[in-house]
Image (spheres, rainbow, N blue to C red):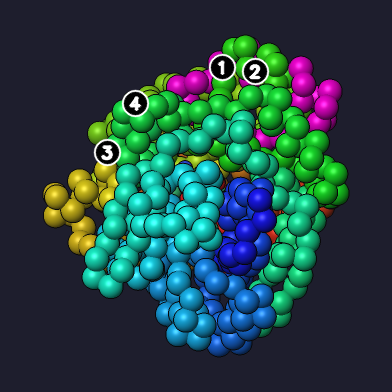
Amino acid sequence: MPRRLRIALVSLYALENNGVRHVAASLRRAGFQVTEIYFKDWVNNNFPWPTEQEVQALIRLLRERRVEWVGFSVRASAFHRMARYLTDRVRHALRVPILWGGMHPTFVPDKAIEIADAIAVGEVDDAVCDFFAALDEGRDHRRVPGFWVREGDVVHRNDVAPLVDLDAIPFRDFHTRDDKFHIEGGRVTVGDPFITNPEYTLLASRGCPYWTCTFCSNTLTRPLYDGKGKQFRIRSVESIVSEMEYARELCRNIRIVRFDDEVFPIRSGWIDEFAEKWPARVGLPFEILVDPRMVSYDPLKKLKDAGMRALCMGIQANDRVNQQFYNRQTTNQQIIEAQKVFRRVGVTSNLQIIWDDPVSTEQDKDELFRMLMELERPFELYLFGLTIYPNTHLARTLLREGRITEADIEGINTHAFEQFRVDLSYPRSKEDQRWLALIVLLNKNFLPRSLIWKLYESERFKRDPRPLVAFAQAANLVKMAGVAGEMTLRGEMTPLLIKRWVNPRSLVTM
Ligand code: B12
């Protein structure tokens, strides 16, 4: 049924934004006129404040499109202040109501509703159509599940909407052209800014089978949906393969597919079907994310034969910190064994570590280093800085124990903008500089392990780690050049990728 209401959805600093594309696709299917706006993109560890030119471009575009409701997708809490600023500017210029959706309003609905006129809490692929249909038909929109609505000082708080059936919602829209815009540096470009990207990202599931990791959003969404059905939902293989057939028609440059699931759904029947249909009907290399607890040879070998090129696995920290602080019941031994499996399967493994936590002792760091030294080479290492998201189990515990204040929590803090990926030149204690330099060096295949042990034992670098850090920076650059070369040969290197990752003020470690 055709609808009159004109809606804009704005993605903040993310050209990918699954959330915006899903909501846009659902609304378009329900007959609404939707304008998708991709407002700026991210650069590793650098999220500059919007310029006046960019704000004006946004306002002009919304005015030209005669938009009646503006929805901001506030995925990460660090964007809270930018979202607030843009909300104020758009509201002042156009006098239209503003809706916020995404993980941030889901994390802190009480704070978000003080700023926006309405917020979406949790998944709303279906509910968003109910919300706007009520408005379109002049019915009461204040009682729609999944939404909170503010009228002056009164807030109407509704329960979350039912979790969606992943096979029933539409694919993210890549076919609409004229309704999509990208704003960057005051320039407005028409069309989907991600359609030419060589990497296509998608989710095979929503939710997480483990959900206990204290730093993660799942410790928060799980209680939100308690008693409301199964939260970890896996798409059918048919739905995934059909999406890829649809996407390949439109995104002509796809070279690699990345599954962004919390963990890839490794279930025996499902993997068999995937391993059969993916190579036959998609045939593109792909990457997945796994947890040490689910690693075994057979399913990974099937995935490798189906085209899996690489996988990511979170190590995070050593046994003690993982178990006591992050509530991840994994062991060092499991991680060592998992890496052996990856080597047997012959798949590239990207192992991830979280640094900058407030509890790891020198002994924990030493144990982590020794465990990493035991891992069978080759492997890639991605170092992340711990970010404390509001309302997570981690934030609540650290606040209760008096180890942090509200100012350390993302939203007021913007850690994700500064040290999302660890940069060796960021100011840290001399001990941490030494550990990080050693960790950066230990997976470089061109450096023998015996050399790393010598560097580790050196008393000189314990006193002054600066030469070691400089050496690690140089080794890191050599590694980066190698990776860039390989990607160029595979046709995966693009100006967008260079812009995002080559931030000379904050070199990413790899
Ligand atoms: C995949 C992913 C990414 C991918 C995104 C790929 C893509 N194609 O979109 C990449 C790697 C790019 C990414 C980047 C970042 N991410 Co991320 N990401 C995720 C992950 C694992 C899934 C997100 C997803 O796609 N979900 C599926 C979609 C459909 O759900 P959704 O986005 O929540 O959208 C639904 C609703 O929220 C709502 N909705 C969303 N927007 C809107 C807007 C309106 C108007 C309405 C009405 C509704 C609505 O409707 C949607 C459909 O139901 C989540 C964890 C999680 N489980 O959510 C973390 C997560 C969202 N990311 C997080 C963070 C911190 C980041 C980064 C800041 C990291 C960084 N420094 O680079 C950036 C931010 C980029 C940005 N500018 O937003 C945190 C945010 C926590 C917080 N409170 O701050 C999360 C929650 C992970 C965590 N640690 O717990 N991320």
Image height of 165 relative to 490, above or below: above
Whether 483 is among the magenta residues is: no
Q: What residue did someone put label 1 on?
A: 267
**Residue 299 is one of the magenta-drawn residues:** yes
Question: What is the quadrant of residue 190 in the picture?
Answer: bottom right
Tag 3 residue: 325
Secondary structure under tag 3 reads helix
Does the CB distance between marks 3 and 2 fall below 8 Å?
no
Disc 1 residue lies near ligand 1 with CB under 8 A: no
Mark 2 nearby-residue class (10 Å; few <14, some 14–19, many ≥20): some
Q: How far apart are marks 3 and 2 (CA)?
A: 33 Å
**Amino acid type assigned to the residue bearing label 3 in the image:** Phe
Q: Which of marks 1 and 3 is in front?
A: 1
Mark 4 and mark 1 lie on one chain; the one further toward the N terminus is 1
First in sequence: mark 4 or mark 2? 2
Earlier residue among tags 3 and 2: 2
> Residue at 38% across / 68% down in the picture?
117
Q: Position of residue 220 (x, y in %)?
A: 32, 42
* Magenta highlight range: 276-301
Marks 1/2 in contact by CB < 8 Å: the verdict is: yes
Residue 302 image offset from top left, x and y in percent: 70, 17
| Picture disc at residue 271 | 2
Circle nearer the viewer, 4 or 2: 2
Q: For the point 70% across and 16% down, which residue is it?
A: 273
How many residues crowd around disc 4 within 10 Å: few (fewer than 14), some, or many (20 or more)? some
Examine the image and state in which quarter residue 430 appears. bottom left
Compared across the picture, whether 21 is left or right of 460 comes to right
Amino acid type at image mark 4: Gln
**Residue shown at 81%/49% (left/top)?**
251
